[in-house]
Amino acid sequence: MPLDWCPFATKRPIVSDNFSVGRDGQKVRAVVLHIAAGPLSAVFPTFNNPARKASAHFCIGKDGTIEQYVSVNDTAYANGLAWKDGQWYNPAGKVVQPTWQDLVPKVNPNLYTISIEHEGYPADKWTEAMYDANNRLLLWLAEQFDLTYVPRRTLIGHYEIDPVDKANCPGPNVEYARMALEVTVWRAARKFKWMPINDRAALYQFAQANNLGYPQTDEFEFVYDGKTYVGQVFNLGIVYARKGDWGNIKWVNK
């Protein structure tokens, strides 16, 4: 069974009125990203107010802080829809036509999703600290629930569930494909150990030019979006590129 609480998040449990214990037999299928439309400091008081009936599992601050409010094995209320008379309704009672193709018919998506709020407003560009924290959390969730992230399928925005009242949540600047790829890099990298140094390799030379330290694994291949990539873990980051595209090498923090 997945761990209830992320070990590197700040645990801030909210009142029981604002979430439901368990998932009514449903399995987590996707992670839904949100924007808080305000500062991190306002999120816990909002979710801890029994009059609001609102919650998410996590919120990430602009500085990379991660707060957790609800166990991942329980149901938060951020992604709710109701099925009635052959139609989906959002929490305000408006008819909606979700674009997320993996909705379970007639089942409230709160029961099979994880919700992550993010500090700021829809027009904001996320900080690098937010992306790093978000990726660390996504990696942990992937390992807990055996998720592979695919934009618009297993990693979605709230607007894909409620395109009426949440059409701009989490906002137009969120880089879903970047996150999915970087978490895929991390997961692939965890499978590999030490290796001999090839100081003529493009990834090695890139790492040395960017002061990323010495290699901790051999080069490894992984597939994302039908394309083959080559990655390698160094002391201070994971370097990767499309196979053969050695002029476009990138790296992510470990």
Image (cartoon, helix red, strand yellow):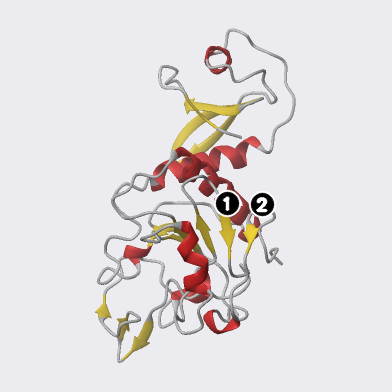
Farthest-out residue, bottom: 85
Q: Is residue 47 above or below residue 37?
A: below
x, y percent for residue 52: 44, 80
**Which of the two residues, 46 or 193, is positioned nearer the viewer here?**
46
Quadrant in the rendering for residue 186: top right
| Circle 1 residues within 10 Å: few <14, some 14–19, many ≥20 | many
* Amino acid at circle 2: Phe
Using the image, tell me which numbered label, if any, was put on residue 137. 1
Asked if residue 23 lies left or right of residue 181, the reply is right
Residue 184, percent from left and from top: 54, 42
**Which label sits on residue 113?**
none
Q: Residue 113, can we see it?
A: no
Mark 2 or mark 1: name the one nearer the start of the chain. Answer: 2
Residue at the far top in the pictured view: 200
- Which residue shows up at 66% across the image and 52% down it? 8
Question: Residue 84 lies in what quarter of the image?
Answer: bottom left
Q: Mark 2 sits on what residue? A: 8
